[in-house]
Image (spheres, rainbow, N blue to C red):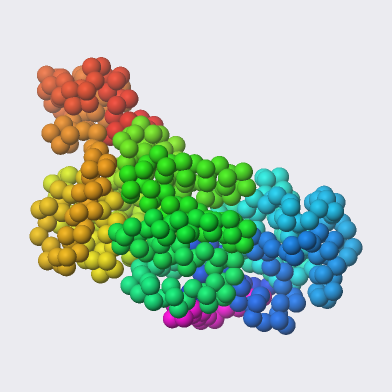
Amino acid sequence: MIEVKDVVKTFDGFRALDGVTMTVPRGAVYGLVGPNGAGKSTLIRQPVYENPAVKARIAYIPDDVFYFPQATIPDMMRYYRGIYPKFDAERYQKLGEVFQLDPKRQIRRLSKGMQKQAAFWLAMSLRPDVLILDEPVDGLDPVMRRQVWNLVLADVAENGTTVLISSHNLRELEDVCDHVGIMNGGKDFSPWSKKDDLLYHTMRIPVEAVLGRDGVGLADCAIAESKFEKGEDVAGRMLALLPQLNEVRNRGTPDMEFAVSGLLARSQLASGQPTDARRTIEVLRECFAERGLTRFLPNMDAMLCRIDMHTGDLDAADAWYREKAPREPTHLNVMRRYQYLRPDTVQLTLAPLEPYVQNCARIIDGIHLNVLTAIALYRKKDERWRERLTAALDAAAEYRFIRTVSVYGTAVLPLLEVLDWDGDKAWRKRLMAAVRTQAALYPHFLEPRLAPGEELTPTELQILHLLCADKSNAEIAQIMDVKLPTVKTHVSHILDKLDVKRRAEAKAAAKKLHLVPEDL
């Protein structure tokens, strides 16, 4: 069994693990899920790297496997056979019939999926008491995924192997796990950003040494993102960071590769280069798809949607909302939290993020949430917008963040111009300049499809729903208990506001504007 009690792990004052407690019974398959930064990889490495006696009974497959540069699978087999007392040569031969990999090829020259197969081949030949898997089937095709899970579950049934799986894919874990635990710490870098220069110079080398592959490029990306959020010009930092992408790709993790490329796209967008930003994400998306890194693709699609909204391509944004947006209105999937900021800005439906940003201290997500909520309330003429925008400004000013607010440009500008906020005047002056710059670059960002004077009244919305349900004017009059001429007047106003001439066109326009459900 695996038992963890109140584990704390600190890196130069930063708590990566804060009182983690967990029990995995012998012979159980335990899934560990959580967002990037929650500490999953840090937790599962504790027994692997810090207890040699336990290590001999454990097989560990990391997200990105790493072997000696020139090694073939037989080379690693001989190496493992010499240090793992339970290595089973007969099982190694039988598993070779399952995976059917070329034994003469160097492992580093195999595809990502084949490298994962090699990792399972070798790990399961150890006959481990405990099998620890970090994103274990990322890169495997569906057929091989099923074969791998069958092998793992057979070991559990026959030998009582204890399995701990860290993954972003909750749906897949539900198929194989007896228990699922969620690590939802995942605090962002906001507290770190207050002393970003000092901490960068003092922590960069030790953090990279301790975190290994997870630390490659981490410090340089974090300092660049901190400066970016503070509204500084990060062009020079990005020029220094981009050459490291090859090193990140070869020695680091795809998470960091995604973070660096995403930051580049955001900086390009903020500088008025949406075409370059789109190209950055599209190239990365194509590369990740080829490498089987499918878990990143939904967030990339959400970033492309954000670019579409900046450039005024609302049809493309609508297509993303209809086809790819998260559909869990009462349950937030924290691994997909970035995507919720896209339907928020397409449709301004914000509920799923509220408890997450509060419980997990997501400062930056909280600022976005409050700004977007303020915009939505302002457009509804609800005075509570002042409270939400004040909360956003208070948090942003505390950490000196500028772009976290200024990204909303023309949508938030009218609110800022009338809000009586008594915070740091110098910071607010910088913020207003940045907001006006974004408003000039993207004058139609978050612009409503319907102008304020064209918004439908509550009665018109009710009639629109009935109209889209193919009810006649007479049926609508009966349902709503009004006179037929009144219904005809309302329908005429609805058609005018939607800029259409026929009832059938009104139904299509209403769906496009998300005024009625897609399935109505």
Front in this rendered view, residue 267 or 488: 267
* Residue 249 can be seen in this image: yes
Front in this rendered view, residue 214 or 383: 214
- How many numbered circles does the render carry? 0
187 to the left or right of 486: right
Above or below, comparing residue 444 to residue 467 in the picture: below
Identity of the residue drawn at 71% across and 45% down: 143
Q: Quadrant of the N terminus?
A: bottom right
Q: Determine which quarter of the picture holds residue 213.
A: bottom right
Q: Which residues are magenta?
A: 1-15
Identity of the residue drawn at 20% across and 59% down: 430
Asked whether residue 3 is drawn in magenta, I would say yes
Asked whether residue 45 is drawn in magenta, I would say no
Identity of the residue drawn at 67% across and 45% down: 142
Above or below, comparing residue 267 to residue 445 in the picture: below
Q: Position of residue 124 (x, y in %)?
A: 77, 63
Q: Position of residue 140 (x, y in %)?
A: 67, 49
153 to the left or right of 362: right
Above or below, comparing residue 30 to residue 266 in the picture: below
Front in this rendered view, residue 223 or 177: 223
- Residue projecting furthest to the top: 502
Q: Quadrant of the C terminus?
A: top left
Q: Determine which quarter of the picture holds residue 13.
A: bottom left
* Residue 354 can be seen in this image: no
394 to the left or right of 255: left
How would you classify the magenta stretch by its main secondary structure? strand
396 to the left or right of 264: left
Q: Position of residue 49 (x, y in %)?
A: 65, 77
Q: Position of residue 165 (x, y in %)?
A: 62, 63
Above or below, comparing residue 71 to residue 375 in the picture: below
